[in-house]
Amino acid sequence: MRHKPIGPIAVGVVSLAAAALWPSGAESQPREPVYVGVRVCSECHEGPRAGHQFSIWRQSAHAKAFATLALPVSEEIARISGIPEPPHRARVCLGCHATGADSEEWERDETFRIEDGIQCETCHGPGSEYIDAAVMSDPQLAMERGLRMPDATQCMICHAPKGSHEAVLAGRPWEVGSAMQSIAHPKPREASAAAAVGSQGTEPLLGTSERRYAGVDRCALCHSGPGMGFQFSRWRMGPHARAYAVLATPAGYEMARRSGVAGDPQASYACLRCHATGAGFESASFEDDFDPRDGVQCESCHGAGADYSPEAVMLDKVAAKAAGLLQPSAEVCLSCHQQGHAGSPFDYEAAVARIAHPTRPAVAAGVNEPRYKTPVNLALTPDGRELWVACEASSSAVVIDTRTAEKVAEIGVGGQPHDVTFTPDGSIAYVTNRLDDSLSVIDVGSRQVVSTVEVGDEPHGVLTDRTGRRLFVLNSGQDSISVLDGETLEESKRLVASRVPWSLALSPDGGTMLVTNTLSRFTPPRTPPLSEITVVDMDRAVIADRVVVPDANLLQGVAWHPSGEYALTTMNRTKNLVPMTRLLQGWTITNGIAIVWRDGRVDQVLLDRPDIAFPDAADVALTPDGRYALVSSSGSDRVAIVDLDKLIGMLDAASAEERERVFPNHLAKSTEFVSSFVETEASPRGLAISPDSRTAYVANALDDSVTVIDLESSTAVRRIDLGGPREISQTRWGEILFHSADIAFRRQFSCHTCHPDGHVDGITYDIEPDGIGVDPVDNRTLRGIYDTAPFKWTGLNPSLQRQCGPRLSVFFTRLAPFAPDELAALERYITTIPRPPNRYRALGAPLTEAQRAGKRVFERTHASDGRRLAASERCVTCHPGPLYTDRQKHDVGTKGELDRSGLLDTPHLTNIYDSAPYLHDGRSVSLEEIWTRFNTYDQHGVTNDLTKDELNHLIEFLKTL
Amino acid sequence: MRLLLIPSLLLAVLLAPAPLVTAEPPAATRPAGQDSDPGLPFIYTRWEQYTVEDGLPNDHIFAVKADGPWIWIGTEGGLARLDKRTGEIRSWTEEDGLPWRVVSAIDVNPLTAEVWLGLFGGGLVRFSGGRFDHFHQLNSGLVNDVVYGVCIENDNVWAATTAGASRYDTITGEWTIFTEKNAPMEEIWNYGCSFDDGKMYLGVWGSGVLEFDVATETWKDYLDPDGEMEIDLYRDDGIVHVITTGVSAVDGTFWATTYFGASRYDGRHWRGYFKKDSGAPSDFHNAIKARSANEAWFSTDKGLGVVADFPTDTWVVYTTDHRSHTGRAVVSRGGQVVETISMSPNLPHNYVLWTELDGDDVWVGTSKGLAHGIGKGYFPGLRRKPVKAQSVESSEIRGGE
């Protein structure tokens, strides 16, 4: 219900809209509560008898919480937090800036408005079942109906210190005591309330307005969001929006008293005249959704808007003017402000500047962050005339003319493009966009994106068969391969890969495709990695074989020898079962290539040397004449040129024992087959070689360039600039540090080694600081972790700089630690690593039945037998939104025989579906196992009473977080 | 492998008539009773047998699935794959990575070539490219590890288990459980499943047949209308019994078996089958496999029964007499024997657990090995015997009785 007449709010009147929801008497039965919004609460909680609780809220930061997301600082916070969505559309931002942001539509009554920010129901629970005045008069009943009386603990879910906000916002630290005081909203004693009411009357004085008032909410339908400069939010943060509410403050009362107004200023036309739009008019002057408590609204300056507010009218300036739209004038402002209470002269120009609301939004500080290219993979057109480069940071494909070695075009594609390929006739280019889960289809001739096709999660490699009739896309986030019809681009089937399929290569005869999987298969605890190369039968487009590469992980690049006898893949050999002290022996992480023979046999050789490793082998390409293989090392900025005759000759001459046990670990063997190393620019990744075997191209991801290598002389002969910015920002510097192995002893690895794509390598490590052989821990993702401190499974590191500081040097890298400015840059980069949007539920999308049932389990307060669960026994207590961690340590009964303590940091659950294995030591390969195998005594929440379908529902809900 | 051949003369006679009758309309299209001699169905007279001696990991054959050149065989002791081109059998046991030794159900996704295995007590397995992916009730959403049936439905895999049915969406990874909570299951012991024309049919021990419409996600149940456990009170009024052991749907018709008879339902009419008044070898059925709306194969405890031509109620029952080391096929119509054909042993054992149709061929899992009926010259329905050949053939056939 909206208010029409200006006057005191009728205390005790209940929203009819809300009342319609309530059951009564014997018909009552438990129902799902819904959010009704602060306006409904205010029906009883406003006015002097209620201590002006609504007005107190309206003046608080909570009421502006949503609006502040429009500020440039919010955009900057989101940027440095790796949140790809704008803040007002980001679930993690909205979780603390708006009530019920993650709720379904049915959970929000029509009286509810998310723009009201943090409302009563954030603290007191969705109100539909207890908001009835009769219920609220019985505290016990109200509690039974869902009314919550929170303590400071709940405040801390959002108000615990957040690195992202501290980095951007200059302000005093939030302190719970003073904060609680600032939002205190006690109900006054009856006598004082009666005195405050006084005897003021507010009968309409001005009759009916010539035009009807629509209210600011009507204006907000169009005048909100970035396209309109967040005009509504800007108003909402301004003093005009609080004009009505301030009348309820002691200062408001005092000013009123000095002006001769007795009692409640909100009931005085003399006050309301300048503190509420439309004051004095009769109720017929207002549309239904007009609310005078919105203070001085748009229509105070622009005229009553019911007639001009329709969009069609507003788009016609003449019509809008004819319908009553006014151009604000100084007279309007001065009619109130000239005789203001401040005492100082009214500076009209300054005031207008303060409330300026242009449709072009203010520029966020972060917008000045240079937009780099970050080329990651490239491909030559079939005729070899053009080189197309997928540029991850600029969401574009850059086209290079190979004859002039110049950039000739740049085509915008989806988010974080990763790979590019062409149809056999070269007419169409396909680019995978891993942030958007899509495939950009580009007409090569016109350089236009002709369509964008949805594929699986986080697509990486893409390739067609020899005819172009089938297209294969690697869904690295779903461990699958999408097979698309080349004509219709519809997905015909999805094949199961291993874990995080990365790259793919077609055999020379077109009959077989190899797919690398960068993460090892799940292996039993304390056993080495076991990686897979998935073999696709191209005739049937089915999986023909799965070649196992023992003791290896991070298989990425792959390419066939033109003979079709074998293929090469890049790989790491991570010795994660021994303490990382073995770094001093030079072999904690070794790097090299696997030789995959047509019959499924596999050899492994290292490209490391005893004095310098070959970190982060990213891609491999073979010359069409079959003589050389080029392998990029993104961690050491080099490309190795492998003499294939020598490599194969070495293998042929070796014993089975040597091939199986010696070569895979031999740090000097590469001297026999690596003919040279070519220096590149920063972080070389994708490789391509010209059809004449004379020229190679390397994408330098962190230099925004392509290095041209002359294969006759084995030298880098040219740097092709892709047009990225010249300057190196702090974030970019951090990115370079993150991807460089210069920090590690003998350059064995970089931060990126264990966190490819800023994510996980999926294996468990024994890190020395805990003691050798003690506390093995699963690797954790770096995506979206800024505000999830403390870090480390033990929760010992309060910040990322602490996590990546000297202790990293002592226990991981064994070289001098990062300098302070390097550390700051590294932290800044890590925090910006994007957190992909949740693939199981978009913001505000309805939950499926199973997800909805799972949410009930997640939030349940009673066990299946009716027993009330203690707070510590509920999922939501330790995993509250929006980050789904309370950032505290808990013992959930998972202490293993190698663990010193069971007290562990509570992990966040954002996108939990893509970071298996689970629990601190990675013992749980699926979400199910967390509770079916490792929660024997209900210490990780009470779950053993759940039926199998209830547990399935819970997991479906968890996947939406 | 033992190739069991019938006498060459008889074989020639049985196979020779086909070209002579091609001009005639199929006998199955003629209404029963309008012709005193509607003809005979195709009789499988050439049989091969496979046992542990041929490389099977175990002779208890619970499931068979044809997959192009391969026959997948689920046994009590592991999984086997017979290459029809070479006759070679490769097997996988727990030592080879098979997560559980008893393979009780098999289906193959025709798009992806993934082989899905139901394990009796071990859950569900996806076998792809030589890798076993194990889904069980602890590491996945599978409702129970005792899996009797597995069926592919689009991108979903269904598992009929002893505690309900599970549906696994291979794209999203979502598991859905169907029990008495969300399906009309009076009991939750799911014995078998069959997918046809947008509908998943579940054979439920104690709950008849349940039909799930994939598009609308709605259920329909088929229960014994008379509710009698011991007798079928009214003939052809519905499913004969609710203790369902198998269901097979094809061409819009489903066939269902129980331990107390069998049923056929074409969407409008029911037909019940009992040993006492049909050609069925037994009322105790282990499984059912339909080739069409007119032909279905019944795996029973007393041999392999076939409704070879539904319109004429023509049955063929294959059994082996292990004492005399002979096999025979008995053709009956309306419960009356019309022909008996002797042959070398056809089934390794008369306790039949599973039947799989493979083009014109048939593969039969028994409690003592696998049988392969070679369907060269197979024809659906019935054909009259050519007069000239018939005189020779009939005497030979009768002589074999």
Image: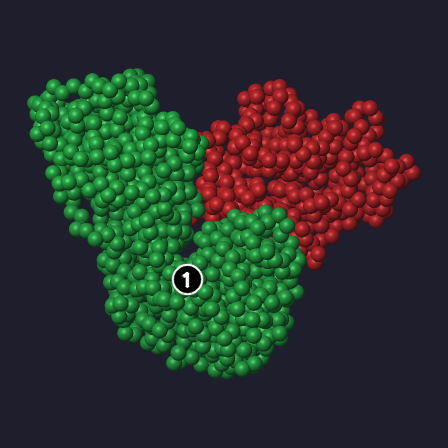
Chain colours: A green, B red
Q: Residue furthest right?
A: B388
Per the image, the residue denoted by label 1 is A372
Q: Is residue B100 visible?
A: no
- The residue type indicated by label 1 comes to Tyr
Query: Quadrant location of residue A189?
Result: top left
Residue A861, x across and y down, in percent: 28, 35
Describe the element under mark 1 as helix, strand or loop. loop
Residue B389, x across and y down, in percent: 89, 40
Q: Is residue A637 visible?
A: yes
Residue A32, x across and y down, in percent: 34, 29
Point 64% across, 27% down: residue: B267
Label 1 marks which chain's residue? Answer: A
Left/right placement of residue B366 relative to residue B9 reads: left
- Indicate the quadrant containing the N terminus of chain A: top left, top right, bottom left or bottom right: top left
Left/right placement of residue A362 relative to residue A720 reads: left
| Residue closest to the eye, B91 or B198 | B198
- Indicate the quadrant containing the C terminus of chain A: top left, top right, bottom left or bottom right: top left
Q: How many marks?
A: 1
Residue B69, x across and y down, in percent: 68, 53
Point 27% across, 23% down: residue: A3
Point 46% across, 51% down: residue: A436
| Residue closest to the eye, A740 or A768 | A740
Query: Quadrant location of residue B223?
Result: top right
Point 65% across, 48% down: residue: B66
